[in-house]
Image: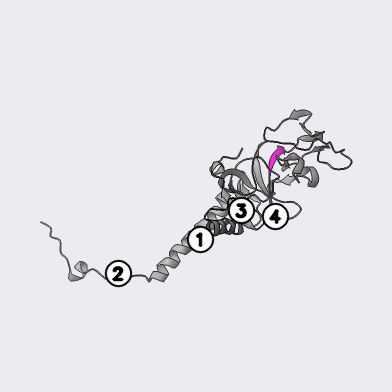
Amino acid sequence: MNQLSFSRKDATLQPRKDKSFLREYGEALGIALILALIIRAFLVQAFSIPSGSMQPTLLIGDYLLVNKFSYGIRNPFTNKVLVPLGQPRRGDVVVFIFPQDPTKDYIKRVIGLPGDKVQLVNKKVYINGELIETPQAVYDDSDRIPGNQVARDNFGPAVVPPNSYFVMGDNRDHSYDSRFWGFVSMDALRGKALIIYFSWAGDHSGGLPHAVLGGLKGLLYNFSWNSRDFKVRLDRIGKIIH
C-alpha cells in the first residue's frame, strides 16, 4: 500500500500579509473608476436637458441615459465608428456633437436618412415627396415665415448626403436644428436616447444645486419645502424616450 508522507513544511500555513486599508481602498476605487470610464466611453452616458427644443418629449431638467453602442462601437477620443452595429432610424431621438461647436452636444429627432430628399412647406415635412407627420412634434406659432427669410417653416428641397442625417426638435417653432445649420454626420452621433432617470422642475437659472438650496431654505424658514425652486417630477422618472 502506498503511503502519503507529509513534511512539516507542508503542514505549516504561512501568515497572509494583509494589505493596508488605504491600499485596498485605492485599488477598489481605481477599478471602479476604470469600469465607470469604460461604461461611459462605450456603453451608456448620462446627459441633461438645458433647453426646451425637444418639448414635450424632453423637458428642461430631465436627466437621461444614452445608449452609446446603438450605432456602433466608437473611438472614445475621436468618436469615429470602429465597429458598425446599426444605423439610425427615422424617429430616433439622438445625441450628437453640434457641427458648429464640437464642445457642445445637442439632442434632436432623426427626420431624414441618407439619400432622402427633405422639404418643408408651410411647416409640413415632406420626405421624397411624401408628407411625414411626427406625432411628438408641436407647433405653437400660427405664423408662416417665408423661406427666403428664415428656414423654420419653409426649407429645401435638399438631399441628405451619405452617412448624414437631417434632424429636428419636437418643439418645431423653437428648435435650432438642421433647418438652420445643416446635416449631422454619422461620426458626430453619440448614441440613442433611452430613458429618463431623473427629472426636476423649478428655478433652472442657477442649476440643480442652487435650486435644491432654494427648496431647502423654504423648509428651514417656513417649515415647508419650496417647490417653486425645486420639485422632483416623479411621473417622468423611468420614462422610455420615443
Q: Are marks 3 and 2 in contact (CB under 8 Å)?
A: no
Mark positioned earlier in the residue sequence (3 or 2): 2
User: What is the secondary structure assignment of the residue under circle 1?
Assistant: helix
Q: Is residue 109 magenta?
A: yes
Q: Are marks 1 and 4 in contact (CB under 8 Å)?
A: no
Mark positioned earlier in the residue sequence (1 or 2): 2
Mark positioned earlier in the residue sequence (3 or 1): 1
Query: Quadrant of residue 75 in the image?
Result: bottom right
In this view, the residue in front, 160 or 222, is 222
Q: Which residues lie in the magenta part?
A: 106-115
Q: Please identify the residue farthest to the left as the structure is shown.
A: 1
Circle 2 or circle 4, nearest the eye: 4
Residue located at (15% from left, 61% from top)? 4
Residue 188, position in %: x, y? 69, 49
Residue 49, position in %: x, y? 64, 49
Q: Residues within 10 Å of mark 1 (few under 14, many from 20)?
A: few
The N terminus lies in which quarter of the figure?
bottom left
Mark 2 vs mark 4, CA separation in Å? 52 Å
Residue located at (38% from left, 70% from top)? 21
User: What is the secondary structure assignment of the residue under circle 3?
Assistant: loop
Query: Which residue is identified by label 3?
Result: 229
Q: Amino acid at mark 4?
A: Lys
Mark positioned earlier in the residue sequence (3 or 4): 4
Q: Residues within 10 Å of mark 3 (few under 14, many from 20)?
A: many
Circle 1 or circle 4, nearest the eye: 4
Mark positioned earlier in the residue sequence (1 or 4): 1
Residue 16, position in %: x, y? 30, 69
Residue 33's disc is 1
Residue 16's disc is 2
Q: Amino acid at mark 3?
A: Asp
Query: Which residue is identified by label 4?
Result: 104
Asked if 91 appears above or below 16 in the picture, the reply is: above
